């Protein structure tokens, strides 16, 4: 009776060698990065700007349908800045300008002056990025 | 004929790959959110906050369940080709991991601290090498445990494993050891820190150097001081931890040379010749990603572009981790015995204690940044 040897599990790669696999990983990551950058620059839709920190909106510096450039002030917030110095927690209320990280257009403003917003939860405004710029 | 073979090969990959992708989708879309909201022992998100169960660990665990329970001990032939793409995902994920870090973050911490951290990283690796030899561990296990203990746990173990030909069970042992150790230190570190009067800066420096897993560094610092602000433990802990993580490519390179040097001597081939074949070229991609991140080419910090880049990285990594889990045979873990656990614990404890002593002796109460 023929003895059938147990089937050996194949190695952990579909490539001919580790070097081929390394190069495939480099190519794959390059393609992924290129795709993400292309998608965000040319295909992504409007971006929601969420509250960057807890605080109160003091002033909205833009209006709906206004064009914005990278670095333009979008709104001014009142926030509590905390810092530990010499073992003591210091807290002070400051006003902070929130600037645009991209070129684009203000599509919609969801928050109002005087409203209190929570970090990463409340959407302040919706921006449409300019084609070719990274939001 | 070649084109048909390639096409056939691609088709054969689909079933196993689909299992990996759908598993991760289920974990991230349903399981992780449920765990974040589930109340256990009176605390919401206990599984996330205390056990640090996230998609990384869940992916490995589910992969292990597939192999050891569902598939009865081996990956079925119809899915095997798909699971063999695992390392491609892992290596791609490690390359993209570089996007989380910037060279500027290194500049913040200063030269002395960088030297200190790197001394601990490589000092721990050397200690693991010595202990591993004493306990008779395989060289691949020594390399993986050394990276896991010296750097930051999961990412380092996985990145190194491909270079030192580690078995998935060895990776699992390294990860399990350092995570288990990390959970204990997560609880006792804040108590020790308060008892001996460490400042936020000193505590962050100690934990950023001495605790083995990045996620646990963050949690431990928050347990010491729950405030997230400049000058708090979590701010300093994360900066010190970043230096450790950025050392991954150097650690992988070092361990590759160490591992293959023995083979070069046995085969009477020059080390250079062996390294030309074996050097893990993909870690150079990690450097490239860190450079791109530093130049804001991947998007500015806080931008939607960088967020999407990092989300994509976590998906790619996660898919690979399901595959890693599926290659872990529980019988191999049992066969390894307790040696890796002992070595990992001794190295972890030594690093933890010595880091505290060094911080007390040389790190001032206040940072100069």
Image (spheres, rainbow, N blue to C red):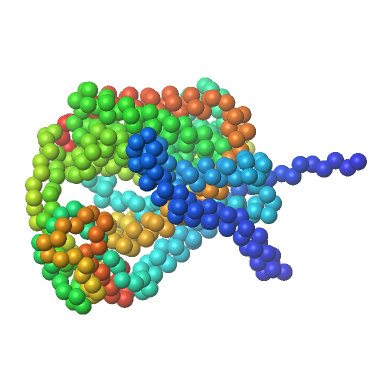
Residue in the image at 46% along x and 31% along y: B177
Q: Quadrant of residue B66?
A: top right
In the rendering, at what x and y percent does residue B342 appear? Answer: 48, 24
Q: Is residue B138 left or right of residue B223?
A: right
Q: Quadrant of residue A61?
A: bottom left
Q: Nearer the viewer, residue B287 or B151?
A: B151
Q: Is residue B146 left or right of residue A17?
A: left
Q: Quadrant of residue B304?
A: bottom left
In the rendering, at what x and y percent does residue B199 appear? Answer: 18, 31
Residue in the image at 61% along x and 48% along y: A12
Q: In this orientation, does residue A22 appear?
A: no
Q: Nearer the viewer, residue B65 or B154?
A: B65
Q: In this orientation, does residue A24 appear?
A: yes
Residue in the image at 51% along x and 28% along y: B340
In the rendering, at what x and y percent does residue B220 appear? Answer: 30, 35
Q: Quadrant of the N terminus of chain B?
A: bottom right
């Amino acid at each position: 009776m023929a003895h059938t040897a147990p089937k050996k599990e194949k190695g952990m790669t579909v490539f001919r060698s580790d070097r081929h696999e390394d190069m495939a990983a480099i190519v794959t990551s390059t393609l992924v990065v290129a795709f993400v950058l292309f998608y965000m620059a040319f295909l992504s839709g409007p971006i929601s700007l969420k509250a960057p920190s807890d605080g109160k909106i003091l002033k909205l510096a833009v209006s709906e349908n206004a064009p914005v450039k990278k670095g333009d002030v979008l709104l001014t917030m009142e926030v509590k800045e905390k810092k530990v110095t010499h073992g003591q927690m210091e807290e002070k209320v400051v006003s902070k300008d929130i600037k645009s990280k991209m070129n684009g257009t203000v599509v919609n403003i969801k928050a109002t002056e005087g409203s209190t917003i929570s970090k990463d939860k409340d959407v302040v405004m919706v921006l449409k990025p300019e084609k070719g710029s990274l939001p | 004929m070649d084109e048909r073979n390639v096409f056939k090969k691609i088709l054969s990959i689909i079933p196993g790959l689909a299992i990996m992708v759908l598993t991760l989708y289920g974990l991230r879309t349903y399981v992780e959110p449920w765990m974040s909201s589930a109340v256990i022992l009176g605390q919401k998100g206990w599984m996330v906050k205390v056990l640090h169960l996230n998609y990384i660990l869940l992916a490995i665990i589910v992969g292990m369940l597939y192999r050891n329970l569902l598939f009865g001990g081996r990956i079925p032939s119809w899915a095997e080709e798909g699971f063999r793409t695992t390392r491609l995902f892992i290596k791609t994920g490690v390359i993209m991991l570089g996007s989380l870090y910037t060279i500027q973050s290194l500049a913040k911490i200063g030269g002395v601290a960088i030297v200190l951290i790197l001394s601990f990283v490589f000092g721990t690796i050397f200690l693991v090498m010595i202990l591993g030899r004493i306990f008779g561990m395989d060289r691949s296990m020594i390399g993986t445990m050394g990276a896991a203990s010296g750097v930051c746990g999961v990412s380092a173990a996985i990145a190194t494993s491909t270079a030192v030909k580690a078995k998935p069970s060895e990776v699992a042992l390294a990860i399990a050891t350092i995570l288990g150790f990390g959970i204990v230190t997560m609880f006792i570190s804040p108590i020790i820190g308060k008892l001996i009067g460490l400042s936020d800066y000193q505590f962050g420096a100690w934990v950023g150097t001495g605790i083995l897993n990045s996620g646990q560094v963050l949690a431990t610092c928050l347990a010491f001081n729950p405030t997230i602000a400049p000058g708090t433990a979590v701010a300093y802990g994360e900066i010190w931890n970043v230096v450790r993580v950025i050392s991954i490519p150097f650690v992988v390179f070092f361990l590759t040379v160490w591992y293959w040097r023995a083979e070069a001597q046995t085969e009477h081939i020059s080390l250079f010749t062996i390294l030309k074949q074996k050097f893990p070229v993909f870690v150079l991609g990690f450097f490239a990603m860190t450079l791109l991140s530093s130049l804001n080419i991947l998007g500015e910090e806080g931008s939607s572009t960088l967020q999407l880049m990092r989300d994509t990285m976590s998906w790619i990594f996660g898919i690979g981790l399901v595959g890693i889990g599926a290659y872990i045979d529980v019988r191999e873990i049992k066969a390894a015995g307790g040696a890796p656990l002992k070595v990992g614990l001794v190295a972890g404890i030594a690093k933890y204690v010595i880091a505290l002593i060094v911080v007390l002796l040389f790190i001032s109460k206040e940072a100069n940044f």
